[in-house]
Amino acid sequence: MKILLVDDSNTMRRIEKNTLEKMGYTEVHEATDGADAIRKLGAGGFELVLMDWNMPNMTGIEALKAIKADPALKAVPVIMVTSESEKTRILEAIQAGAANYVVKPFQPETLQEKISAVTQKAK
Amino acid sequence: MSQLKIKVEHINPFVTSTIETFAKMVGVEAKPGKLMVKKGNKEDYDISGIIGISGGAKGMVALSFPKSTALRVTNKFVGTAYEEMNADTIDAIGELANIVVGYAKKGLSEFNVLISLPSVITGTNHQIMEPKDVFSFIVPFETPLGGFHLLVSLKAAE
Amino acid sequence: MGASVRVEHINPFIEATVRTFQTMVYSDAHAGKVVLMPGAGLRADVSGIIGLSGMAKGSVSLSFSRITALKVVSAFVGARVLALDDTVTDAIGELASIVAGAAKSELSQYRIQISLPSIILGGHELAGPGDVVPMVVPFQCPQGTFNLVVRFKSEG
């Protein structure tokens, strides 16, 4: 399964990549902001996106909206992984079409569970 | 204008967030020790992740470590095995501070705080001095990976 | 990588530093060439660091050697200061706040808010993190040389 990690922090991408590799996902690509993500998603074939919220150039929520507005991309499930923990923010992301939401700090197991839930549903 | 004041209990969200972040993301218990008022205290650190706070409350928060703790914590946090500090260690300390302060925001919602990017300072035995006339605290933490300090300086914005 | 660094963001900080030194330290500070310093550590003995948040996030730092810090603070407070004491930490924090505050109003489109200063003492480096490249401006003034370091990242 081809997965895109979007986060401006090298550390966060590395942590998320570790979690995905433990789950057996090895085809993991990385983007450093929303605009970079949209560009990379254009290559096609992605089946899951993990998206941070606060990033330069294009934020995660803007990128999420752009993905959901693009007929070619809108089927790709997006899980938001962010330190934005307020209910209004979570609601905003879900309304914009996020498949799930993980608040930092998270346990690797929590991220695994949410990824499993989303990928099973997609099948 | 608001009559909000900073009290000792406003330090709690940072303490709780530190405990949770270490439990969830580093996988160790971080036990807070006795809170100390910081007034000119000169404690020596080797690496610090510092975040500025603005909005309805202004201040700064730092997570400050001796080198040995920083290496063990970041190795466990990121899944690396470094024996010396490098760009990845520095990045990880910044992100750790970012997560701690980002999550603590929730406990300070009445202040509507905004947080800056983390700055990471390295240097054997550097000290962090608090801004003038601001409520400042040190919370020492103990973990199985070594000790570190949480520094919080906070005041309600005028 | 990732974050765009635009040199026009640094100009308000340079102008603010020059103005602040003119009016508060009675010192002519001349800016050298802006240098992008990815990864490289910048040594200093005293730094005043301010966090920036809002539609752009980042940090501003004024970083000094011990001797320049003592001379600048002496000129600023109008008394000879010989050791890195409370007067120095307060003055360096104050200078950093004034510079950040003045630059903020020139960057109003980002609705920047500034934090309180942290003052770092003891040999140190401003090290990162690596996703935002620091813009470093070396300054020369009669009291010595110092560096202005700006990390700036617009959100969205």
Image (cartoon, coloured by chain):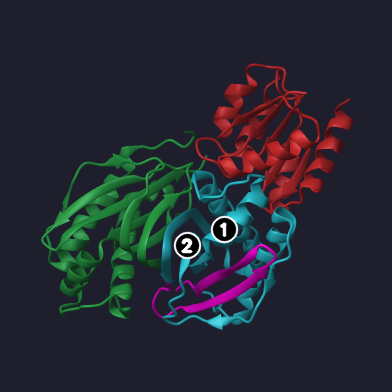
Neighbours of disc 1 within 10 Å: few (<14), some (14-19), many (20+):
many
User: Which chain is represented by red in the image?
Assistant: A
Q: Is residue B119 left or right of residue C150?
A: right
Classify mark 2: helix, strand or loop.
strand
> On the image, numbered disc 2 is attached to which residue?
B46
Chain letter for mark 2: B
For badge 2, the amino acid type reads Asp
User: Which chain is represented by green in the image?
Assistant: C
Tag 2 and tag 1 share a subunit: yes
The stretch drawn in magenta includes residue B140: yes
Tag 2 and tag 1, C-beta contact below 8 Å:
yes
User: Which chain is represented by cyan in the image?
Assistant: B
Of callouts 2 and 1, the N-terminal one: 2
What's the magenta region? Answer: B129-158
Residue C100 against residue C87 in the figure, above or below: above
Snapshot quadrant of residue A2: top right
Q: Is residue C79 left or right of residue C46?
A: left
Query: How far from the left and from the top, in percent, is residue A32?
Result: 56, 34
Residue C80 against residue B102 in the figure, above or below: below
> On the image, numbered disc 1 is attached to which residue?
B70
